[in-house]
Image (cartoon, grey):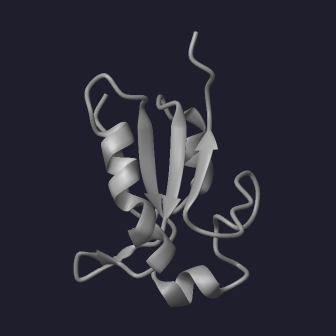
Amino acid sequence: MPLREVEFPSDPKDLEGAREQFLIFYSSRVNGQLWCPDCVAVDRTIQDTFRPQDGPSAVIVYVGQKPEWKTPSNIFRGEPWQVTSVPRLSRLKIPK
């Protein structure tokens, strides 16, 4: 299944009904580039794993630009996700 991407959503609870098996939390992009060096380091592996049609399904969720992410009130730091660092891979569903 193709890898889907979601720009910084206004309500993270909108992701609770995602059809995908995994959520991948990434830094947002600046001029087409991820601002987080750790996200850059794992991006090729993420793409190779989740991009193929027969791969597991996932959605990349961008947590915001660096100033947005660094604030304690970032919407992904609270419930229901409690993301403390990026990148983060969260399993939503166990395949049958």
Question: Total of numbered circles in the picture?
Answer: 0
In the rendered image, residue 72, in percent from the top left (x then y), is placed at 73, 82
Instruction: Return the residue nearer the eye: 53 or 79.
Output: 53
- Residue 75 visible from this viewpoint: yes
> Which residue, as the protein is rendered here, is positioned at the far bottom?
67
In the rendered image, residue 93, in percent from the top left (x then y), is placed at 61, 26
- Residue 64 visible from this viewpoint: no
Residue lying at 31% horizontally and 28% vertically, measured from the top left: 1
Residue lying at 46% horizontally and 79% vertically, measured from the top left: 36
Instruction: Return the residue nearer the eye: 65 or 37.
Output: 37
Quarter that holds the C terminus = top right
Residue lying at 42% horizontally and 31% vertically, measured from the top left: 57
Placement of 82 over or under 65, stated as above or below? above
Instruction: Return the residue nearer the eye: 19 or 26.
Output: 26
Instruction: Return the residue nearer the eye: 64 or 51.
Output: 51
Placement of 48 over or under 42, stated as above or below? above
In the rendered image, residue 61, in percent from the top left (x then y), is placed at 46, 56
Quadrant hosting residue 94: top right
Left or right: residue 70 compared with residue 25 = right
> Which residue, as the protein is rendered here, is positioned at the far top?
96
Placement of 1 over or under 16, stated as above or below? above
Placement of 63 over or under 73, stated as above or below? above
Residue lying at 28% horizontally and 35% vertically, measured from the top left: 2
